Image (spheres, rainbow, N blue to C red):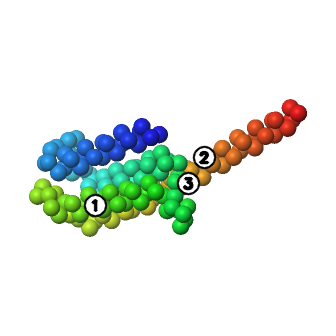
Amino acid sequence: MKLITGLFLLFVASLIYMANTGQENILFELKRQIAYGDKVGHFLLYGTSTLLLNLALNGKSLPLSPALQVGSLAVLVATTLEEFSQLFIARRTFSVLDMCANVSGIFCFTLFSLLILKMLSRRQDGLSEKHVTDELELN
């Protein structure tokens, strides 16, 4: 999972670099063809980054609350810095709506990652209970 997450984050970083330097790619063309494509792209890219990072970190959370996932917070900080950096890059445009799409994706995919982690935990607990039951029956 960590390899997939690392590769995806590298992919996102390459998209940011391409946008910062005015390069084109098929995804940039696709976003122009879809209504609200830019906002959908922000939602999906940063949401997927959140999901993968939370899963790669095995749901590591802050002591304040299990819902405060370290991966989610890392993506939130990175996307906020990236969006505000656009104020200083001539080819880019800062957008509050992009920030809203980023935060929405992070929030929705955090909930999704919490659900997946809970399902995996229950599955693991079920397998552990079955293993204990099997051991008791053998003895």
Residue indicated by mark 1: 81
Quarter where residue 25 is shown: top left
- First along the sequence among labels 3 and 1: 1
Seen at 26% across and 58% down, the residue is 82
> Which of 99 and 62 lies nearest the eye of the viewer?
62
- First along the sequence among labels 1 and 2: 1
Seen at 88% across and 33% down, the residue is 139
Q: Position of residue 12 (x, y in %)?
A: 30, 46
Residue 139 in the figure: left or right of residue 22: right
- Which secondary structure, mark 1? helix
Instruction: In the displayed orientation, state which residue is furthest to the top.
Output: 138
Residue 77 in the figure: left or right of residue 93: right
* Dots 2, 3 in contact, CB < 8 A: no
Asked if residue 105 shows in the view, the reply is: no
Q: Which mark is residue 115?
A: 3
Seen at 21% across and 51% down, the residue is 32
- First along the sequence among labels 2 and 3: 3
Residue indicated by mark 2: 120
